[in-house]
Each structure stands twice: as structure tokens, then as C-alpha cells.
Image (cartoon, rainbow, N blue to C red):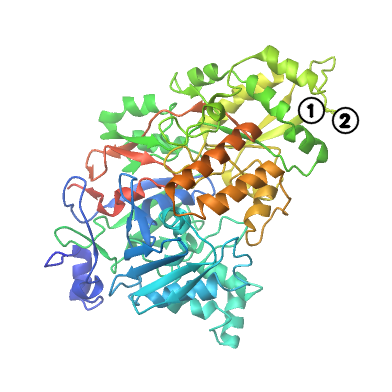
Amino acid sequence: MPAKLAESPALADQVKAGKLPAVEQRVPKDALVLKPVEQAGQYGGTWRAALVGGQDTAWLTRTMAYENLVRWDPEWQNVVPNVASSFQANADATEFTFKLRAGMKWSDGEPFGVDDMVFYGEDVYGNSELTTSKGTNPFTVEKVDDLTFKVKFEKPNGLFLQNQATPSGADFTRFPAHYLKQFHKKYADAAKLDQLMKDNKADTWVKLFQLKGWGVPGTPYDALWSNPDLPTLFAWQITDPYGSGNVVNTKRNPFYWKVDTSGNQLPYLDNIRYDVLQDPQPLVLKAAGGEIDMQDRSVATNQNKPVLTDNQQKGQYHFFETVPSSMNNCSIAFNLNHKDPALRKVFQDKNFRIAMSYAINRKEVIDTVFVGQGEPWQLAPRKETPYYNDQLAKQYTEYDVAKANQILDQAGYKKGSDGMRTRTDGQKLSFTVEATATNTDQVDQMKLVVGYWKAVGVDAQLKPEDRSLMYTRKNANECDCVIWGGDGGSTDAILECRWYFPFSNESNYAEAWYTWYDKPSNPQTPPEEPPADTKKQMQLYDDVVKGSGDPAKQLDAFKQILQIAADQFYAIGISLPSNGYGVVKNNFHNVPKSMPGSWLYPNPAPTNTVQYYIAK
């Protein structure tokens, strides 16, 4: 810790006015000290960014809300302390001990500590009404002393620390007990709780708690972005909530617990302003005009790069590089659990999926959409990883219309006089392909793909739509085919297995098999027992990958999972992504020239956005 602390002039004025305690009383004694990318920054200014579509909360997480117990280092090599000042695991990965920072406070100035961890463990995760399913490996939270607590699992959890460094590790640090107890049946006065339910139009106390402190299952609602009264550990607090207008505004948290090497309390920037846009084109215009300070999400596409390149001097910005963990530009997920038995039979037919893959002219897609940048690739880990499986990566990637037609003919999908095929029940083989409208790269790819499929007699209708609508339909098992990206191709492959077996509700090809496996709270898709080979993958993941602390055993088991994925061929990929980019204003500093690009990283947050600053 530096010997002396300093603070934003705006906060210093509030201290002088008696509205805030002195900085020495707000910052913990063992604050986290961050080294800058370039140099110590300057206080003040607004980071201008944008959210696109109706559910773009991921960009909020990536920019201002990555404050878990632990985090990834900026190079994505190691798990390092964050809210917890130290951590350790026992030999069999069933018990994890964390020590918190003395004197940390929530954004409202109330103490943060182990009691908040216990509240989460016993009264949120441990409450059967709030958390209706504890998963396949439940845990308990045990207080050791005022700064130390343990998380104990029934079975080994060899990936627990790595998962805590991803966005899914946010739960331990997002529930302020002092604030949320007023909405919890265990603690609140019954009459006051009833009145709060009426005031907030919540028919149960659980719904009230979700509205005020968590999220409403099945909706994009999350209290982190919608309830300005919810105390936080983030560097900035929401002032104008997401969903209330065309702008999401924030302000600095005066009790933030990180400092730079000179003792300056972070963040440097006063606030982040997010314009809420319905489609990406206005964002491109804003970026080209110099009205976006730093962003890659929703703007950094291959189609947009020429216009952004041409306007660099006028807009006074430059590019930074993102090195993707994604292993595919486009994942095509037929719904193997479709509610219509006839379409389910088609989609579960591996020969159908193989034929659909052979029918895709990947070279033309790469040349047309990605200016020749890419390589034909299925949904498989990248070659530079220890997880690479050549069969999984390259099978069925040849463009072979004759072979596609032959396979479809042999599978019984007959062509009519119009050249279009029927299912084995005699009905027309037709389905809808749903994609997020704001992801123009994926939409452009699929415009070509549905044309290739029609050329072999398969009628596919592309339906670009709002992300929130697509997710609502997908989660309810209402989709025929869903288009998304290829997450989990790099360091994150062993953590992000969505395309290798039905691992999460992002395994878009088999929501019902995922529900059977993970037993989530309030599932929208009823569980369905998966085939034997799929269950073997789930068992290997639970018993060895998560159930062992031995990296060699974990690697061997994961390779077996990938080989089964190759044999099952659950979903289709198109091409391996090239490196990405983002835009950053010339006066916006401490942004690395290159950073990993991944949701599990989740960039740019691990590069320490609290140290970004605007030079005056």
C-alpha cells in the first residue's frame, strides 16, 4: 500500500462539505494496488460507450461489473486475488478458504465482509424458494472469523477457482445483506414485507427479492442494472437504469477499494455513459465520428472496418487488437430436443447434419463476409490449445453438393417436382433459422447458408430478431435452429463446454438434455434424458474434470469428451475467426494494444478498466 492516499477532486469537495468521510476512512487498509498499463492517470471525464439491442447486459459486465472474489490476470494466465486478498484450496478440491480485505465497504458506506458471504450461502443459495436447485454438487459457506470464510463442496470441484474468475463467479459478491434483508422473508417484518410487495407489484416475496437484488428468471431483468438503490462493490454505480430510457448513466463509487501505485483511489473516470441503441448502424456512425471512447462489442465487425479505418484521423481514434478465444464465427444449432416429433427426428439424424455441413461453401462465406480472413472449421478448440482434436475441427468442412444430395437421398428426404425435399412423414422439410439481428456478421453468413441449403432441396427461412426475443424462445425450447458464436475455443475450452456437450443453457442444440444434466432452478424447458454417449461426457466432466485436482487427469478426461463430441457432431460451425479489433480514442489511455477476447475473460474488464483515463 502507498503511504499516502489521494482522491478525485469531486470527492475531495464532498469531503470538505462533510458529505463523505475522508479517503483514508473509505479505502481499506489492504486495498488492491494496480499497476497501470502506461502511467498513472488523470481524474475526470466520461467514458462514452453504447449498448445495442434489448438485452446487451454483457457489455455492462465487461466494462464495469467484474468484481468477483478472484479474477483473471490481464494476460489470462492465472487466477489472482480480487475482492479476496488471498485464497487456497485443499488437496482434493472440496474446500476453499478465502480471506477478505479489512475495512472494505459497499457503495453506500456500509461494511462489506464475511457476513455477506454467509448471507449469500445460507439465505440466497441455501434458500430453497430463491434457489430451487443446488446443482449436482452443492456447497455450504462457513464463517471462520470476521475476514475468513470457507466454501465446502460435497464432492471435489477442481474448476471452482477458475469458474470464480469468470462472469459466473459474481454471486458471492453481489448480495449486500444489510440492504437485502428487508426483502427476505427470514428477516423482514411481515407487515412491512407485505407492503413492499404491494408497492413493487410483486405477488411473492421471492419475486420482490429478485426485483430488488437479483434477477427475474426467464427475463433479461437484473437488479444490478435496474435498481439504482442496490449497493455494489463496482467502481461505478448505476444512476439511470437499463430499460428506463435511451441512456444508462453511472457515477463513481466513493468507497471503491482499489488504488494505483501512487495511492490514487480509483477509478480515474467520473462515470460511464451508455447510449441504448436498437441496431448497430448508429453505433458505427458514432464511432466513426469520434463519439465512442473505447469499444469493440457490436461495432468491430469486418464489414465496419473499412469505414472505421477511413475515419480514424477525423474521429481521432485508433484500433486495439483482440485475440479471440472463440473458435467459430458462426454456430448452427439444430434443436435436437424439438417439441415437434417429426422435426426432432430430422434434427437428431446425424446424416442430416452432415449433409447440411457439406452443403455450405465455407470459402465463399469467408471471402464474402470476412474478406478472406478465416479457415473452414467446425465447433472445435483452436489448434494452439492442448485440446485440439483434428477430427472435430475439420470433419465435413468440404464443400460437396453432390455428397450432400447423396446423403439426403439415402436418408429418405425425397425431392418433389419443385426440387424441395420432404421429411420421412411426407411433409415439406422446412424450418426457421433464428439469429440476433444486431450480429450482422452472423446474419450475413446465414443469408448465404440458407441459399446453399435450398440448392440441395432444404427450405430454411432466416429470421433475424432481437436478442432478448431469441433467448426467450430458445430457453423455452421454441426454436427450430439458433445461430450464435463459437465460445470456448482457447484457454476457456475446459470451462466453456457449451458446444462439446449439453453443458449449459447456451448449448442451444439441446436445452432439455442440459436441464437433465444441470438441474437448474426454474427451468423453462423440461428435462429429457440424453443418449448414453452424451451421459458419458457428463459423467467424465463431473467425475474427473471437476472431480479431480490433477491437471493431467482433467486433460485426459476432457480429450475423451471432445472425441465423443466429434463422433456425435451435435452442431455445425463455419470458420475459425481471425483476430478482432476495437476502437479507442487517441486521448483515452491505459488500454492495452492487445488483449484476449472472450466472455469468460471477459474483455476488457481484466485489463483493469478502472485505470482507463482521458488525457486533458
Give the labeled residue for mark 1.
429
Decide if residue 481 is on the left or right side of residue 581.
Answer: right
Q: Quadrant of residue 424?
A: top right
- Front one among 249 and 361: 361
Position of residue 6 relative to residue 482, above or below, is: below
Residue type at numbered disc 1: Leu
Residue ID at (56%, 37%): 562
Position of residue 303 relative to residue 156, above or below, is: above
Q: Nearer the viewer, mark 1 or mark 2?
A: 2
Q: Residue furthest left?
A: 3
Quadrant location of the N terminus?
bottom left
Residue type at numbered disc 2: Asp
Q: Position of residue 470 (x, y in %)?
A: 62, 44
Residue ID at (58%, 74%): 127
Label 2 Cα crowd, 10 Å radius (few <14 / some 14-19 / many 20+): few
Regarding residue 188, the answer to whether it shows in the image is yes
Q: Position of residue 58 (x, y in %)?
A: 46, 49
Q: Residue furthest top?
A: 402
Which numbered dot is residue 425?
A: 2
Q: Position of residue 52 (x, y in %)?
A: 48, 44
Q: Quadrant of residue 99?
A: bottom left
Dot 2 falls on a residue whose secondary structure is loop
- Number of marks in the image? 2
For the residues marked 1 and 2, what is the alpha-carbon distance in whole angstroms? Answer: 10 Å
Q: Quadrant of residue 356?
A: top right
